[in-house]
Image (spheres, grey):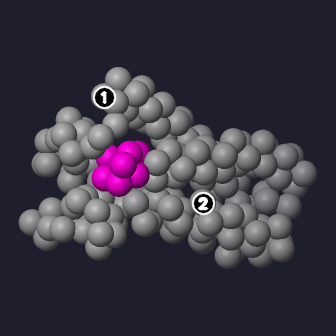
């Protein structure tokens, strides 16, 4: 796994794993939006498959990131090369982590609710409940992505 700590490809001083994770995180909302479009186009099976794949890949990417960050020494090590204010960064990181955890919980519920009730997807009750939880999940994915990319910029660009 030493390869993941080599120089990244985004021409910053970030390690490779941070570049890889940041690119995936940046595209995540677009992939989820496309999966939502599939549902709007009544391609429910494609929607379900794509959402499940995106969800699983997302969890794998977060695990990969967490492993890399822990092995490298965590946030404090990344902050050493950042020109940003430490107090601001801890507050921003806390906000990002809170949004990420809440989004993951809501998205998890949305995915498992969809899987559990897939056979009832044509019922109005299912669609209403699924949409009710899916909308905040999508907003959370977008906010998590946005704040994650901003963290990368704060740590490795500015």
Q: Which residue is mark 2?
A: 29
Q: Nearer the viewer, residue 47 or 7?
A: 7
Question: x, y (%) of residue 32?
Answer: 63, 63
Residue 126: percent from left, percent from top: 81, 50
The secondary structure that most of the magenta stretch takes on is: helix
Residue at the spot x=67%, y=76% of the render? 46
| Direction from residue 127 to residue 104 in the image, left or right | left
Q: Which residues are magenta?
A: 151-158
Mark 1 element type: helix
Furthest residue toward left: 2
Question: Percent from the top left, x then y, of residue 133?
Answer: 71, 42
Residue 151 visible to an observer of this rendering: yes
Judge left or right: residue 145 versus residue 80: right
Q: Quadrant of residue 157?
A: bottom left
Reply above or below: 20 against 102. Answer: below
Q: Does the segment drawn in magenta span residue 41? A: no
The residue that appears at 79% across and 59% down in the rendered structure is 121
Location of mark 1 (residue): 86
Judge whether 158 appears above or below 48 on screen: above
Residue 156 magenta: yes
The residue located at (31%, 28%) in the rendering is 86
Mark sitting on residue 131 = none
The correct choice, above or below, for 67 with respect to 94 in the image is: below
Viewer-side label of 1, 2: 1
The 10 Å Cα crowd at callout 1, few under 14, some 14 to 19, many 20 or more, is few
- The image position of residue 79, as x and y in percent, is 24, 39
């Amino acid at each position: 796994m030493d390869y993941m700590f080599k120089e990244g490809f985004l021409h910053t001083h970030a390690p490779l794993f941070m570049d890889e994770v940041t690119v995936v995180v940046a595209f995540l909302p677009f992939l989820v939006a496309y999966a939502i479009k599939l549902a709007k186009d009544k391609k429910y099976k494609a929607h379900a498959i794509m959402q499940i794949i995106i969800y699983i890949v997302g969890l794998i990417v977060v695990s990969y990131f967490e492993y890399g960050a822990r092995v490298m020494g965590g946030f404090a090590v990344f902050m050493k090369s950042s020109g940003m204010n430490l107090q601001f960064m801890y507050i921003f990181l806390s906000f990002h982590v809170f949004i990420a955890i809440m989004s993951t919980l809501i998205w998890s519920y949305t995915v498992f609710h969809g899987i559990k009730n897939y056979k009832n997807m044509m019922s109005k009750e299912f669609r209403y409940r699924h949409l009710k939880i899916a909308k905040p999940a999508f907003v959370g994915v977008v906010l998590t992505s946005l704040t994650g990319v901003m963290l990368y910029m704060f740590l490795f660009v500015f």
